[in-house]
Image: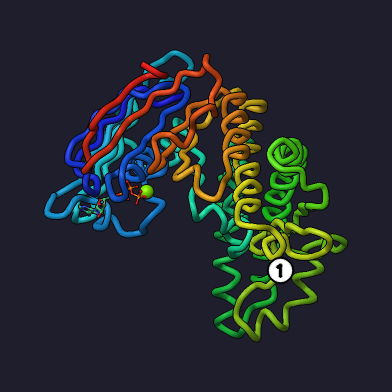
Amino acid sequence: MSVTRLDIHHLRNIASLRLDLSAQTNLFHGPNGSGKTSVLEAVHLLSLARSFRTTQHRHYITNQQPQSTLFAQIDVDGTRVPLGFQRCSDGELSIRVDGERVDTVTSLAEQLPIQLINADTFLLLEGSPAIRRQYIDWGGFHAEPRFLATWKAVRRCLKQRNSLLKHGRMDPSVRAAWDQELVRQAEALDSYRAAYLQALIPRFENLLAELLPLDSLELQYYRGWDRKSPLDEVLAAGLERDCQQGFTHAGPQRADLRFKIDGAVASERLSRGQQKLVVSALKLAQGFLLQEQKGRRCVYLIDDLPAELDRNHRQRLCRLLEQMNTQVLITSTDADAFEGCWHTDTEVRSFEIRQGALAKNHVNGS
Ligand SMILES: Nc1ncnc2c1ncn2[C@@H]1O[C@H](COP(=O)(O)OP(=O)(O)OP(=O)(O)O)[C@@H](O)[C@H]1O
Ligand SMILES: [Mg+2]
């Protein structure tokens, strides 16, 4: 799976830009503020219908323009599938997959799975548990067809239970019915997450060993409630507190991944570069697993890859991306940052972006 052509209209400082991409490595370089990250943002919008930089569309639609419009030709096992995205300044969103208008972004994410590595990726280590749940759930969504429906059912049950808790008096039979359904769905969700992580963690450890040997790093899954107790018992034992505070304390909505080094929280011990390599290994592990389990490849968007990494570690990361044989879009202010990083048989297309336009492009040393 790769994006063969990308058309961007009125996204940030890009008025109109057409890019013919390599199915392997694409490097975007140019000065600060030239529009490199905006190219990655375009692919992200085409995959998920939301930006990774803002929750408000008015920030990415070019000033004074009525809408941002994006098109991509994607190659899915030799078949060309066109994707279209348009966001108007009044908020209206239109998404097209293969010429058909679709209502949910789920079909986009399925057609074009992406992985983003940028400065926010550090939050996988140091941010809130919600970010790590999102990471696990990306895997669950792609690995298990029943995942999304189960995830939605858990959310619905919790919303209902929390609203009953907030209203103070709760009919015990109504609560029991919701608890029963919540427990059933929560256990299913936990089993999908646990199965995914059981497959993922060894991949992650192998990749990390190639990037940065860190034998003492431990990764543990916390399911959101005590490992030894069934959820129905935990809910019953916590009912008084849940009623007092008006929400459900235990359950899959509290799941987390815990990173430890010698018993301490890993983000407190790792250098910035080490953290970047750990989060990169986490993101690469998901891509490798998607290929192994589903035969599908995701597109990697890597913003400012050279930042925090010395030449040796840059090269190691590039080598793993080559091994994955997947499409990669990388930004860097420095055109020479990747010298010696790629094998000569990897197709590397370089695009120089200046003031939202393509200044130059070339393939491998041409
Ligand atoms: N809504 C908007 N309308 C017009 N221009 C915008 C809008 N939002 C941002 N910009 C401009 O678009 C450019 C976006 O640049 P982008 O973040 O893609 O740059 P970059 O090449 O990644 O830079 P850096 O190397 O600093 O990361 C900036 O110059 C910014 O000022
Ligand atoms: Mg940038």
Mark 1 Cα shell of 10 Å, populated few (<14), some (14-19), many (≥20): some
13 on left or right of 176: left
230 on left or right of 224: right
Which percent across, then down, holds residue 289?
66, 32
Whether residue 306 is visible here, answered yes or no, is: yes
Q: How is the image coloured?
A: rainbow
Taking the spot 69% from the left edge, 58% from the top edge, the residue there is: 270
Q: Split into 4 quadrants, where in the image is the C terminus?
A: top left
User: In the displayed image of the protein, which residue is found farthest to the right?
Assistant: 228
- Label 1, secondary structure: give it: loop
- Seen in the picture, residue 68 relative to 72 is either above or below; the reply is below
Given residues 39 and 331, the one toward you in this image is: 331
Taking the spot 49% from the left edge, 54% from the top edge, the residue there is: 119
Given residues 203 and 174, the one toward you in this image is: 203
109 on left or right of 71: right
Amino acid carrying label 1: it is Ala
Which percent across, then down, holds residue 36?
33, 42
Residue linked to disc 1: 250
Given residues 174 and 117, the one toward you in this image is: 117
Q: Give the quadrant of residue 184.
A: bottom right
90 on left or right of 271: left
Which percent across, then down, holds residue 167?
55, 82
Taking the spot 44% from the left edge, 25% from the top edge, the residue there is: 2
Whether residue 144 is visible here, answered yes or no, is: no
Which percent across, then down, holds residue 360?
26, 28
